[in-house]
Image (cartoon, grey):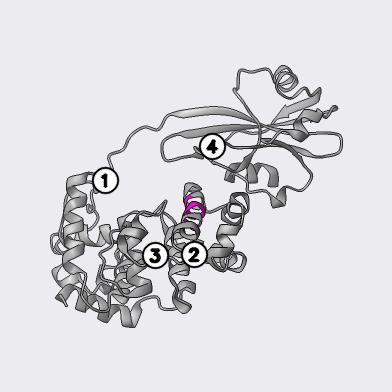
Amino acid sequence: MTVFADRLLDWYRQYGRHDLPWQVETSLYRTWVSEVMLQQTQVATVIPYFEKFMQRFSDIATLAQASQDEVLLYWAGLGYYSRARNLYKAALVIAEQHNGEFPQSYEDVLALPGIGPSTAGAILAQALGQRHAILDGNVKRVLARYQAIEGWYGRSKVEKQLWTWAENYTPERDVADYTQAIMDLGATVCTRSSAKCDVCPMQTDCQAYLTGRVAELPTRKPKKTLPVRERRFLIIRNEQGHYLMEKRPPAGIWGGLWSLPELELEQLVEHAVKQNWQLIVNKYSDLPVFRHTFSHFHLDITPCEVMVSATAEAIADAGHYRWCSDISQLALAAPVSVILQT
């Protein structure tokens, strides 16, 4: 047991989180789902989604027997939807290749869709106590400050250094507690801003603290100007009050989710609606523009209410378009949900 791990575990027993839903009832399946949900998402946000997800998909067999559409419906609002698609794909792989049992070897877990080295290690460490180092965002921040490692950790050289320290500090015993402890320290004490150094168990030999560089480390990602794209989202309603919804392609942005039909801003609404969907526009009006930001661009959305008087039969039969009277059962892209609610 390293001094680092020993001190961290002492802190965790007093101040760490011990009553999270996936801790109260532990299994490989529950740990796996929680770890995937927690990728790029905070614990407080994940908890209600996790509990609702578990009520519907109580085990791997139930998840594998569901449809991707339903899985996305229960994921809607969590964002980063490729995580949900990969979770579903992994459930199918487990059902086919592992007799429905979540694998227990690191190599087999790492081979599942959507699981990288840190997630694989976290699942096996927390559910089975296997010794594997982890390196999620919280752990990177703790180690970068503790060792005063400079450079953005998206660069391979810096990440390699962090993995070396993560391996060095991971103990041979109490691995499940240690794994949760170092994530908790990053999430609650060694935070990105306003770090609580006065209550940190690593304060006495944290190099960033001792040299007054806590605010500087870890080195931030180099800033770049995000490009801006503009689209008009059509809220097309027929005389029965049904909405015309479009299912996104399986891959890419909002893959597999339901969205509103889109147009370029320069396209004429009446002409495009008639050409694309054989519908006659009675009236239309643009609503205020709002911005939705992705990791690699801004999307300026102009919602446009469109009332139509004719319903094309072809739409009802098309796989990626559907007239909907009840959108509550659709997995919606986040900005689409906002548009339709307001």
Disc sitting over residue 291 in the figure: 4
Predominant SS along the magenta part: helix
- As measured in the structure, the alpha-carbon distance from the residue carrying label 3 to the one carrying label 4 is 42 Å
**Res 187 → quadrant:** bottom left
Q: Label 4: few (<14), some or many (≥20) within 10 Å?
A: some
Left or right position of 233 against 10: right
- As measured in the structure, the alpha-carbon distance from the residue carrying label 3 to the one carrying label 2 is 9 Å
Amino acid marked by disc 3: Pro
Q: Are marks 4 and 1 in contact (CB under 8 Å)?
A: no
Q: Is residue 298 above or below residue 126?
A: above
Labels 1, 3: front one: 3
Amino acid marked by disc 1: Gly
Labels 3, 4: front one: 3
Q: Are marks 1 and 2 in contact (CB under 8 Å)?
A: no
Magenta stretch in the rendered image: 86-91
Labels 4, 1: front one: 1
Whichever of callouts 1 and 2 sits on the residue coming sooner in the sequence is 2
Residue displayed at 73% across by 28% down: 285
Q: Is residue 104 above or below residue 156?
A: below
- As measured in the structure, the alpha-carbon distance from the residue carrying label 1 to the one carrying label 2 is 35 Å
Read off the residue under disc 2: 100
Q: Mark 3: which secondary structure? A: loop
Taking depth in this image into account, of 247 and 262 the one nearest to the observer is: 247
Amino acid marked by disc 2: Gly
- As measured in the structure, the alpha-carbon distance from the residue carrying label 4 to the one carrying label 1 is 27 Å
Labels 1, 2: front one: 2
